[in-house]
Image (tube, grey):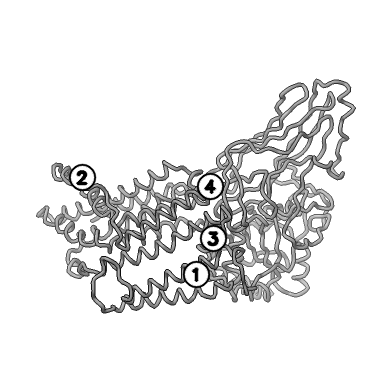
Amino acid sequence: MKKCFSLLFLLAAIFCQVLPAQNLEPFKWAHELKKLSDADYELVFTATIAPGWHLYSTDIPDGGPVRTTFNVDAISGMELVGDLEARGKLVNVYEDVFGMELSFFEGSGQFVQKLRATAPEYHIEGYLNYMSCNDENCLPPTNVEISYDGTAKVAAAASKAEAPALKAEDEPVKNDVVIDKSKSGEAVASVPDTLGGKTASVEAGEAGSDWTPVIDELAAYESGHGEQFDMSWLYIFVAGFVGGLLALVTPCVWPIIPMTVSFFLKRSQDKRKGIRDACIYGVSIIVIYEALGLIVTSIFGASALNELSTNAIFNIFFFLLLVVFAASFFGAFEITLPSSWSNKVDSKAESTTGMFSIFLMAFTLTLVSFSCTGPIIGFLLVEVSTTGNIIAPAIGMFGFALALALPFTLFAMFPSWLKSMPKSGGWMNSVKVVLGFLELALSLKFLSVADLAYGWGLLDRETFLALWIAIFGLLGLYLLGKIKFPHDDDDNKVGVIRFFLATISIAFAIYMIPGLWGAPLKAVSAFSPPMNTQDFSLYENEVKAAYLDYDEGMAAARRTGKPVMIDFTGFGCVNCRKMEAAVWTDDRVRDMMTDDYVLIGLYVDDRTPLPKKEEVMENGKRVVLRTVGDKWSYLQRHKFGANAQPFYVLLDNEGRPLNSSYSYDEDIDKYIHFLETGLRNYEKRK
């Protein structure tokens, strides 16, 4: 028994070691000024991008994330030729939150600005401004500063065309500097010329008390939100584990359990050896399915997996694939592997001995049970592959195989449990049909992505919800025995479990009905099309920040005697919108945020120019703050030691934290606890 647990523990330990840490500095930049001819040059920016992150291109439509631009501070002896170009393999995806197609680089990318020398000597100062995101966070727009001086072989006449030098305080030359202003439609509060009331050029830590760093104080809180833990790993593992449990109770697997366990116990007179063989059998199942997950990962790779998440062609394929799986579970046909495969593996297992024979027996199980496990595995791999995480298929398969392997091991350890196993029967076919309904419902998620990508308008939010209402209503009727499929028996009795499941399914269908008129339906928000596809909506329940300026908001909090909640967000932050739709709309959350706190919203990608450029020293380097977003991004880094969005922090009237920070997590109860803890700590300090 100890050996069995040791093997499982070793597998889990190896598995956990491959989980990557979150990288909040995902880019390495290089830049050079290439000479093409006597007068023609190219300024080349090359980015090396960490896995899971993407770098937005130059052609992002208005109202989306910040596009990459090249901006000039001072230029003489040269002129810009054309616009900034993105060179390399761009990924084009449709983003539901913004309702538009976006293009970005993954892995690596290159931006090129063409220049032409107009005088024998040239000087250029400027910066590349870019924005990046991953599945959990977005980083604020960031600058890559450049400065080049040199000489060029140009005709004397060309020098007459020399463009005047730009000073830092001058207005940009038209067509030379691209400044993207916010398209939010909201008025932006006035921005003071100084940081916290100090001069425009300050050393880190010299700003007013509201700007004093509180990084150590935030770290002192141990509520668990200070660390940005990626819960998607746990979700994928649990999804795989649940899939494995469902596979257990199908007609292809459940009857095999007692036969296999009895074989191992009778195979040897030594009970301990029988248990050891059963453990090896279980571990072999895990190894086989884990290998399947790794194969999927190696075939596609990180970039391709992310591309699958919104690629229209792949999503149509996945939709059709899941519909086929659902039809198989309904009894239209069976998806089976060639019988010769299982026969050959089975005969090989009989002719060999030792651990290898046990491994072949486990492999035989995977082949003969494919008609039931195949659709479950297929859906699991489709779902986790489209998350864009490179090892998501391996995580999902680990959970699936662990659930599938556990009964064989546990029943071998405790043979008396076999007597209490439910007998095989028609109930197992009902499990398959229920899974068919679920796969049919989830297939619509993939069709929705394709519909949005091509702009067909076939599956807007009302249509999607209407189909789900029909599917779950029919599922309820099936569980009540009102609908029969080919492999169902003629028993008209409805068991207690089926009755309760039918009640849940019908209640869920009724719950979705108000969504046809615009109700948010948080339980299905991750699957349904975005609210902007709703043709008719009666719902209005938004939470908006009272202040868009940090200093003004802090002053208001002192006047009213309320604590402060700062929302570091961005117009191009996908997960910020998800939090606002899924969490802020909760009545308890909304009431606390609007009644008990002064809410300050700071957009780190706000491109509104500051009245005067400001310089700060950060980590020994000079950083120029040119826009409102630059200023709030610097505040987040300088005061709180963070640079990802969404990022929520609660402060007292002196600018000190009341709790640990909170990032992307749609758990409403956790968010309420976060807000309540801040209020309690604020009252204690008063």
* Rendering quarter of residue 278: bottom left
Q: Which residue is mark 1?
A: 466
User: Which amino acid does the dot numbered 3 rest on?
Assistant: Leu
Left or right of 51 on screen, residue 129:
right
- Residue at the location (14% across, 55% down)? 263
Whether residue 264 sits left or right of residue 577 in the image: it is: left
Q: Which residue is mark 3?
A: 458
Mark-to-mark CA distance, 3 and 1:
12 Å
> Disc 2 or 1, which lies upstream in sequence?
2
Look at the picture and state if 196 lies above or below 563.
above
Question: For this view, does 438 lie left or right of residue 572?
Answer: left
Element assignment for label 3: loop
| CB-based contact (under 8 Å), mark 3 and mark 1 | no
Foreground mark, 2 or 1, reads 1
Q: Position of residue 398 (x, y in %)?
A: 36, 53
Three-letter amino acid code at disc 4?
Gly
Q: CA distance from mark 4 to mark 1?
A: 35 Å
Which disc number belongs to residue 52? 4
Q: Nearer the viewer, residue 49 or 371?
A: 371
Residue picked out by circle 2: 340
**Residue kind at label 1, given as amino acid type:** Ala
Q: Quadrant of residue 574?
A: bottom right
Mark 4 or 2 closer to N-term?
A: 4
State how far apart marks 4 and 2 are (Cα): 41 Å
Q: Quadrant of the N terminus?
A: bottom left
Q: Nearer the viewer, residue 370 or 490?
A: 490
Structural crowding at the residue carrying mark 1, measured as other residues with C-alpha within 10 Å and reported as few (<14), some (14–19) or many (≥20): some
- Residue at the extreme left of the image, as rendered: 269
Q: Nearer the viewer, mark 2 or mark 3?
A: 3
